[in-house]
Image (cartoon, coloured by chain):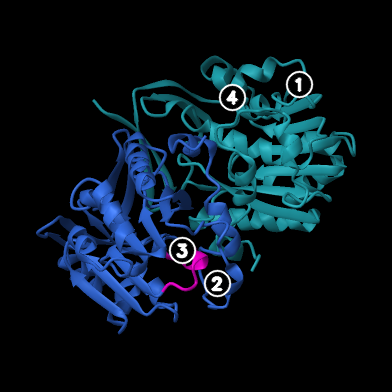
Chain colours: A cyan, B blue
Amino acid sequence: MELWYTEEWSEFTRFSIKIDEQLHSEQSEFQRIDILRSEEYGKFFTLDGLMMVTEKDEFIYHDMIVHPAMAVNPEIKNVLVIGAGDGGTVRELTRYKSIEKIDMVEIDGRVVDLCKEHFPGTSSKLEDPRVNVVIQDGLKWVLEADRNYYDLIIVDSTDPIGPGEGLFSTEFYQNCYNILTDNGILINQNESPYFDRYAKEMRRAQDKIRNVFPIALAYQAHIPTYPSGHWLFGFASKKLHPLVDANHELWLENGLKTKYYNPQLHFGAFALPNYVKELLGDV
Amino acid sequence: MELWYTEEWSEFTRFSIKIDEQLHSEQSEFQRIDILRSEEYGKFFTLDGLMMVTEKDEFIYHDMIVHPAMAVNPEIKNVLVIGAGDGGTVRELTRYKSIEKIDMVEIDGRVVDLCKEHFPGTSSKLEDPRVNVVIQDGLKWVLEADRNYYDLIIVDSTDPIGPGEGLFSTEFYQNCYNILTDNGILINQNESPYFDRYAKEMRRAQDKIRNVFPIALAYQAHIPTYPSGHWLFGFASKKLHPLVDANHELWLENGLKTKYYNPQLHFGAFALPNYVKELLGDV
């Protein structure tokens, strides 16, 4: 017997991975969670049938959602992470001694529990004493948190359809702005520019962020297990510019060994193709 | 009925495109050629079951195999293109008024004929008076061509298995070196770093090029229809450095509208992830 996981990257495009074993499947309060094991990608899990994390290439996503912001503001102390139940984003953040507090607000406690069981590689640092895991809707958290408190907010969400939908709204971005410090940075995963469905969501999210934040740019990474392999992140801030204010002399003093991110790539990631700039209205 | 084209990106990974119609299929003297039509990608063709060109994203590959070299040496006059039977590389080259002569040496005349019939978007400039299309083995051509003649050689080949195999040999690279001018540049498509099979070929090719050329770097692009979507090109030269010698003031004077390439992206493309640098032995 052959078992294949197949994801529809678009109506006309499928990406499939050969599976050794389906380790777990459940319908949580919020979404369907599947955990699978494959020879090439190791373990991976999906939410509502969409790829979230594979052991083979999670380092790319987690490097790129954390390190660019940390290189722009080395004085980040208080961090809010929304979503990210697998723990990979928190793992990268805990590598910085300068970070004092990480609130991780994940709506679905089952994702956290299952990742603790199946993905020690990403979830191992959720027990770090600086980390406060809260099972709650991120929308509620950003509405009620103290103003001018967080130096960095990372929105490590699912796509804009399903439980992650509200995390792509203007109201949410405005609440993020309110609880960020003057040097505050907002990072969000921002879909792919290649397939129409994802590109529309990318454009909509970016437009909304730009209505709230004076600085808002997109940057890219090669993530082969996400639709098209061309994935974007959003960098928004009140005043720090991701290229002008990047300080890699200081960043290198952290002595972090990274498998994807490096200082030259920081600048390269913001160098978008013309067709993507056009989609974002930047030409 | 549903018709799907499926390519094995690795033993455990498949990429599939929904097909409207198979327009043509034949076994030429050298390889199997298939031409297909799909709603999302327009027409595309495969050689021995591997994706070559789609109407949707050929602009990415052809931008990136041509413009970086042209920005490094604006005085390129004589160009040799090996492979590239679809004509897309020649199309981009003919946009430069400064180029005087393009020899395109393609081993398989059937690819050229079929692309002229089915892909006017890429093949339209093969009739440019500066273009000399030769149906011949590129290995023979580089052995017999005049020394110190070409300013640029572009190896737009298939993978290292099948008819393209010799185009990844040390002897071939040495012959390219011999027929290049002192400012000569060699560009080759150089596989993907993500899947082991491709990564090994990438490393082997790069090692061989470095034994022949004093300057040899790799650069990357997001090409979603190639395995992993993370594709590399090689830039080798006798003395011009792709970053130090890039002259985009002059390049912009050409006034070319490009859908992927731009000056910032030129530098970004050479900013490789750490894991790719390690594969290439650059760390």
Q: Secondary structure at mark 1?
A: strand
Q: Which mark is residue B84?
A: none
Q: Nearer the viewer, residue A153 or B178?
A: B178
Kindly report the distance in space between the C-alpha atoms of the residues bearing marks 3 and 1.
Answer: 51 Å
Whether residue B68 is in magenta: the answer is yes
Q: Amino acid at mark 1?
A: Asn
Q: Which residue type does callout 3 highlight?
A: Ala
Q: Residue at x 27, y 70 (%)?
A: B104
Residue A276 placement (x, y as % from top left): 57, 60
Q: Quadrant of residue B251?
A: bottom right
Q: Which x, y percent locates residue B249?
A: 61, 71
Do residues under tags 2 and 3 come within 8 Å of each other at their CB atoms?
Answer: no
On screen, A15 above or below B264?
above
Residue A132, label in figure: 1
Q: Are marks 1 and 2 in one subunit?
A: no
- Residue B271, percent from left and from top: 55, 47
Q: Return the residue at label 3.
A: B69
Check disc 4 and report its element: helix, strand or loop. helix
Q: Residue at x 65, y 57 (%)?
A: A204
Q: In the rendered structure, which segment of residues is drawn in magenta?
A: B66-76
The residue wearing badge 2 is B251
* Same subunit, tags 3 and 4: no
Report how far apart the C-alphas of labels 3 and 4 lie in the structure: 48 Å
Q: Mark 1, chain letter?
A: A
Q: Which residue is painted at 23% across and 25% down in the image?
A: A1
- Distance between mark 2 and mark 3 Cα atoms: 10 Å
The crowding category of the residue bearing disc 3, from other C-alpha atoms within 10 Å (few below 14, some 14 to 19, many at least 20), is many
Could you tell whether A96 is left or right of B172 in the image? right
Asked if residue B48 shows in the view, the reply is yes
